[in-house]
Image (cartoon, rainbow, N blue to C red):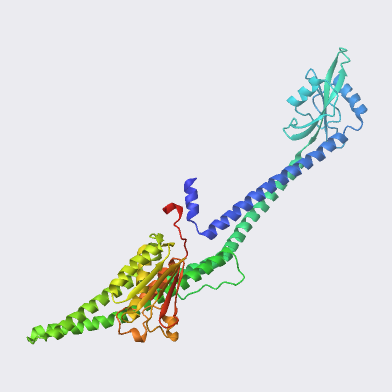
């Protein structure tokens, strides 16, 4: 059985559907056919029973014939050549087991246990219908009528007896056999038709799946993510939902590929500048060593400082690229409840080291959020770095945290209105800031980190000059019970 099930499961879906439909129809047709056959059999037997009862309309004459049969008992029936054929069996069975055939009977009927039990009861009744056979083995329908008392004229003794009236079942059985053959043929045609219809329906129903399979194979073969499966707007079945999901998946993959290609192109562009500068400076140093022409100490020191700065910029750019390349699943595994105030304080310590000449004020209230601690601190450090970078010497940076809203306000030149929509784009740098160190990924990382934490970040002009960076993060002023 398990082997059959395994082989069934390896068949194509359309074949399995056709077989299941054919099996279901076969079961239903078989149930209907069997029920129909038994109903017809009951009706035919009921008709034969009625015919048997009609034979007993003249009961007195039959009783007289029964008494005469006992007195002149015979177990052999003779057919007169001049009389019409007889069609009914009449015989009397006495309590002593003696069987006497009435003169107008067409033959004898085998006495069954039912007849013997009926004679022993000795009570008159409506009679009992049952099946039996005649002397030739032909099936007959018998009406056994008890309640007869027969007196033997020779001995003068009385005994209980029963009258057996029977009709042949040849025509009835022929009708039932013909009906069984017709039902069998109709059932076979119905099952074959159901299997063919199931196969046709399966093919029609699975045609969208075939299209989806072809589309998937095409994508796997050509890596073409622009393919789409047409879906009707009002279709809401499972195939339509699957097709829409596939189209959405390919669209997301195509968008992801475009972003990846854009990131690679932008990264290559950003890496080219520091690498070119490094190559130029190293070639100058190498040529000086090869030619024996020493570079003036001041110029050599400037070259080494430039190499160090370019290496630092490369390391920062590579770190930013790694941060952007991290998968969402990896980030989700490290999310935990974080004290935003402690994170801001840690970022402030790093910012004060980078801008010792600046005055950084902080007013921080407790606030707890769900985020990745290192990523959140890096995002806040990037915001503070921008404020330090663009603040004038001796300037002030105001930092405030109140009910999940973090604001960082500097007093620098500010950002032109036409550049504000682009500040969170990857590798975008303001023309006025291109001479300053940076990769153009800092604010992009900030936007991504804050968005993953369920918040939002904005940059706006500050009254009196400068820029205000605002970060809103959902959370609570107290930690949840599980981390207290």
Seen from the viewer's position, the closer of residues 122 and 179 is: 122
Please give the count of numbered marks on the rendered protein.
0
- Residue 203, relative to residue 432: is it above or below? above
Please, which residue is most extreme toward the left here?
292
Q: Nearer the viewer, residue 188 or 55?
A: 188
Q: Is residue 457 above or below residue 95?
A: below
* Residue 85 visible in rendering: no
202 left or right of 371?
Answer: right
- Residue 62 position within the rendered picture, expressed as x and y whole percent measured from the top left: 89, 27
Q: Quadrant of residue 14?
A: bottom right
Q: Nearer the viewer, residue 278 or 41?
A: 278
Residue at horizontal 69 percent and vertical 48 percent from the top: 32
Residue 195: x and y in percent read: 60, 57
Q: Is residue 174 left or right of residue 188?
A: right
Task: Pinpoint residue 423: horizontal percent, then vertical percent.
Answer: 41, 80
Q: Residue at x 68, y 53 (%)?
A: 186
One can see residue 104 in this view:
yes
Q: Nearer the viewer, residue 377 or 166?
A: 377
Residue at coordinates 83% horizontally, 32% vertically from top-left? 79
Measured as percent of width and height from the top left, residue 155 is found at 86, 12
Q: Is residue 306 above or below residue 87?
A: below
The image quarter containing residue 126 is top right
């Amino acid at each position: 059985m398990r082997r059959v099930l395994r082989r069934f499961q390896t068949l194509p879906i359309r074949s399995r559907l056709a077989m299941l439909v054919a099996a279901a129809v076969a079961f239903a047709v078989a149930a209907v056919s069997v029920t129909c056959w038994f109903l017809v059999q009951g009706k035919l037997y009921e008709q034969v029973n009625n015919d048997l009862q009609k034979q007993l309309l003249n009961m007195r004459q039959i009783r007289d014939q029964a008494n005469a049969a006992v007195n002149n008992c015979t177990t052999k029936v003779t057919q007169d050549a001049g009389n019409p054929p007889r069609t009914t069996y009449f015989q009397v069975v006495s309590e002593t087991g003696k069987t006497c055939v009435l003169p107008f009977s067409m033959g004898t009927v085998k006495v069954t246990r039912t007849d013997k039990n009926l004679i022993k009861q000795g009570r008159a009744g409506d009679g009992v219908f049952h099946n039996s056979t005649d002397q030739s083995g032909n099936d007959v329908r018998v009406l056994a009528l008890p309640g007869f008392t027969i007196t033997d004229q020779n001995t003068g003794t009385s005994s209980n007896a029963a009258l057996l009236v029977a009709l042949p079942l040849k025509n009835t059985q022929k009708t039932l056999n013909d009906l069984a053959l017709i039902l069998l043929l109709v059932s076979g045609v119905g099952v074959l038709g159901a299997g063919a219809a199931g196969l046709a329906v399966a093919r029609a129903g699975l045609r969208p799946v075939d299209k989806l399979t072809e589309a998937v194979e095409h994508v796997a073969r050509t890596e073409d993510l622009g393919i789409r499966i047409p879906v009707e707007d009002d279709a809401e079945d499972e195939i339509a939902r699957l097709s829409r999901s596939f189209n959405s998946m390919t669209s997301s993959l195509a968008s992801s590929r475009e972003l990846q290609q854009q990131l690679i192109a932008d990264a290559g562009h950003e890496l080219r500048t520091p690498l070119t500068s490094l190559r130029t400076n190293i070639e100058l140093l190498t040529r000086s060593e090869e030619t024996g022409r020493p570079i003036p100490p001041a110029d050599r020191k400037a070259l080494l400082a430039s190499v160090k700065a370019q290496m630092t910029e490369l390391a920062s750019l590579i770190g930013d690229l790694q941060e952007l390349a991290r998968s969402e699943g990896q980030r989700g595994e490290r999310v935990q409840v974080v004290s935003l105030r402690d994170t801001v304080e840690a970022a402030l310590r790093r910012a004060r080291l980078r801008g010792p000449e600046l005055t950084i004020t902080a007013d921080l209230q407790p606030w707890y959020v769900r985020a990745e601690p290192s990523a959140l601190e890096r995002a806040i450090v990037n915001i503070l770095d921008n404020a330090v970078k663009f603040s004038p010497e001796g300037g002030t940076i105001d930092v405030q945290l109140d009910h999940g809203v973090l604001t960082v306000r500097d007093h620098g030149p500010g950002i032109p209105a036409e550049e504000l929509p682009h500040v969170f784009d990857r590798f975008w740098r303001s023309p006025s800031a291109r001479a300053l160190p940076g990769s153009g990924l800092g604010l992009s990382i900030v936007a991504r980190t804050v968005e993953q934490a369920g918040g939002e970040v904005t940059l706006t002009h500050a009254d009196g000059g400068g820029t205000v960076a605002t970060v809103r993060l959902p959370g609570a002023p107290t930690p949840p019970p599980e981390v207290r």
